[in-house]
Image: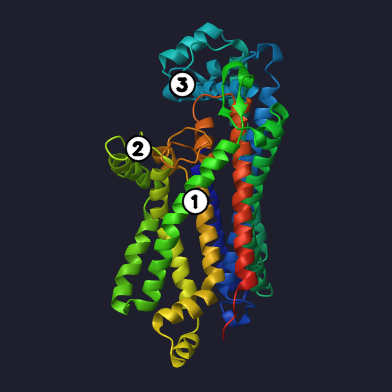
Amino acid sequence: MPLFWLIMIVLAVAAAGYFLGRQRALASAGGNTRHLHSLPSYYGWNVAMKAAVPAFLLLIVWLLVQPVYINSTVSGMIPDRTVADNASRGLVMAEVRRTAEGLDNAVAEGTMTRDFASDMRADITDVTQRLKDAGQIVTSTVTQPVLNAAQRYRVMNATGTLWMSIAVIVLAFAGAFRGLREAHSDFRARNTVEQGIRAILIGAASIAILTTVGIILSLVFNTIEFFRLYPAWDFFTGLNWAPSFSGRGGSSDLGVLPLLWGTFYISIVALAVAVPVGLFSAIYLSEYASPRVRSVAKPMLEVLAGIPTIVYGLFALLTVGPLLVSVFGRDGLGWMQSGTAVMTAGLVMGIMLIPFVSSLSDDIINAVPQAMRDGSYGLGATRSETIKQVILPAALPGIVGAILLAASRAIGETMIVVLGAGAAAKLSLNPFEAMTTVTAKIVSQLTGDADFASPEALVAFALGMTLFVITLGLNVFALYIVRKYREQYE
């Protein structure tokens, strides 16, 4: 049964249970709501929640567990001798899934019968040719172990989906039946429903925590796998970045220092642009601008935060890069050879970060009490002196936190770097040379038909873990600065 219809059936059972539970509760009270412990709607919601929530929980768990179980079972069917030296079992399983999908599509289109697609004794040549004729295969040949595994995969997947549908529907009806039995005048439906809603809210709040934990665990496990294949010392101290897929990583140099240098260099240039412009904009908007000007300028400034980063990347590639070449290139000062450089990416990234610095700083400056301004004016200070000697010192911890948060955003940027800074991993102080960052190399390492058991693919997870630790440290430090030096005003 398709997943959409399964969800619709559960929702229909829950909706029917709501109305039946409400009517049953009213009938038990003789139609007089004053004889009920709770409002009639609570009895209906009790039935609906008992029908839908357990069924959907089972559905989610089943959808998470079934692929893992099927993959592990089918993977054991593939003999080790059939896995080539230059291929991993993961790639073979990907071929198994593609073949199984091709068999399902061929059956759906009528070019292959269901029994023939599931026949483990079917001729490999005949099956391969039928898949090719139906346009459902992308490889030139399908080996017998892969075909057998694909047939077993689709049978197990279909069987698991069938049993999942039955179990979910049965659980939905069982929950609705239980809720209907409780729909009588003495049942404390309101208490039960409120406790259930509280549990649902706790579960929803836990999703973010569980997602974060899942991301961290995936990074940790794959990073550990990478360091089993490549020395950690060479990774963190190497001065050369030269991955090579020849020999499955035997000739690769995977030193992260050039990537970290490019990441920090471009971020420093970006902050050198964003911090002055953003801070001065915040000071003007909060201290000098009239309400009418502020109502127009602040939203227009924050529009920059809503522009997709790919647009900034194209702006860097097509506009800023050629403009810098015309000034600093061969026809100008002769410092810049091409439009892709640290300066190009840094300038555009700085423009992107202006709203982050400006908006946060503006809110922090506005949080300084007006009494401090009035006291400074009462002592004879001018507006500029009040800003320099009273407002900025009071808002400095928050401004520093805003700058550090903007730095974290700059370190994690990808598209502007890919289009504006180039792909060269090097250690250089020249801002007019092409460099690259950690995020750009993560994209390049995971793009294309790569063996995910090789160091060149697993290194992306090590790079991601390194970047995660760096940005986490910056965020923690920013929160520490804000909380330690924050001034509390009444």
> Which mark, residue 106?
3
Q: Which residue is mark 1?
A: 268
Q: Position of residue 304 (x, y in %)?
A: 36, 57
Spatial separation of the CA atoms under disc 2 and disc 3? 50 Å
Relative vertical location of residue 139 with respect to residue 42 in this rendering, above or below: above
> Which mark, residue 54?
none
Which of 24/7 is in front? 7
Relative vertical location of residue 75 with respect to residue 430 in this rendering, above or below: above
Amino acid tagged 3:
Ala
Q: Secondary structure at mark 3?
A: helix
Amino acid tagged 2:
Gly
Q: Position of residue 334 (x, y in %)?
A: 33, 36
Give the quadrant of the C terminus.
Answer: bottom right
Residue at 53% of width from left, 59% of height from top? 405
> Which mark, residue 339?
2
Spatial separation of the CA atoms under disc 2 and disc 1? 19 Å
Spatial separation of the CA atoms under disc 1 and disc 3? 55 Å
Relative vertical location of residue 180 with respect to residue 110 in this rendering, above or below: below
Residue at 66% of width from left, 24% of height from top? 74
